[in-house]
Image: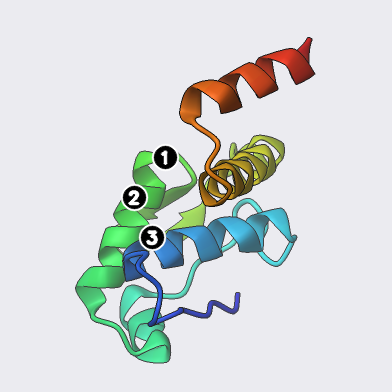
Amino acid sequence: MILTLDLASDRPLFNQIVDGVKRSLVDGKLEPGESLPPGRELAGALDVSLETVQRAYRHLADEGIVTSRVGRGTRVSESVDIGEMALGASVDEIVEHARSVGVSRQRLIELITTAYG
């Protein structure tokens, strides 16, 4: 799993880690049941604090994407729905694009409702 962070981004570092793990799953670089790097190791590799990585891992656990056990580390959940995760990433891109071109939330909902049929 290779993650890169954009230090110039307004997006918090822990969110960038969360997004990177999700992207690795969608891209097939991570598989259900696979171990994530230990927090200290990932923090060192990314040059961020351990707390930043732990916050990202907690967020992923809260979403049901990973499971953590003391002494066993953090693993991708066996029941993670990669298809839904990929759809969520696409929706995030659409929302970001809509914002960038000035489309309101209500108008975006209307567009999606019309497209969905």
Report the disc number at residue 63. 1
Q: Amino acid at mark 3?
A: Asn
Q: Quadrant of the N terminus?
A: bottom right
| Residue contact between numbered discs 2 and 3, judged by CB atoms under 8 Å | yes
Mark 3, residue position = 15
Across and down, in percent, residue 38 comes to 39, 75
> Is residue 50 something that shows in the picture?
yes
Q: Is residue 99 left or right of residue 12?
A: right
Across and down, in percent, residue 89 comes to 61, 47
First in sequence: mark 2 vs mark 3: 3
Q: Nearer the viewer, residue 75 or 10?
A: 10
Q: Residue at x 63, y 51 (%)?
A: 32
Q: Amino acid at mark 1?
A: Glu
Across and down, in percent, residue 44 comes to 35, 90
Mark 3 vs mark 1, CA separation in Å: 13 Å
Which residue ends up furthest to the front in the rendered image? 102
Indicate the quadrant where residue 2 lies.
bottom right
Mark 1 vs mark 2, CA separation in Å: 6 Å
Indicate the quadrant where residue 80 lies.
top right
Q: Residue at x 63, y 43 (%)?
A: 94
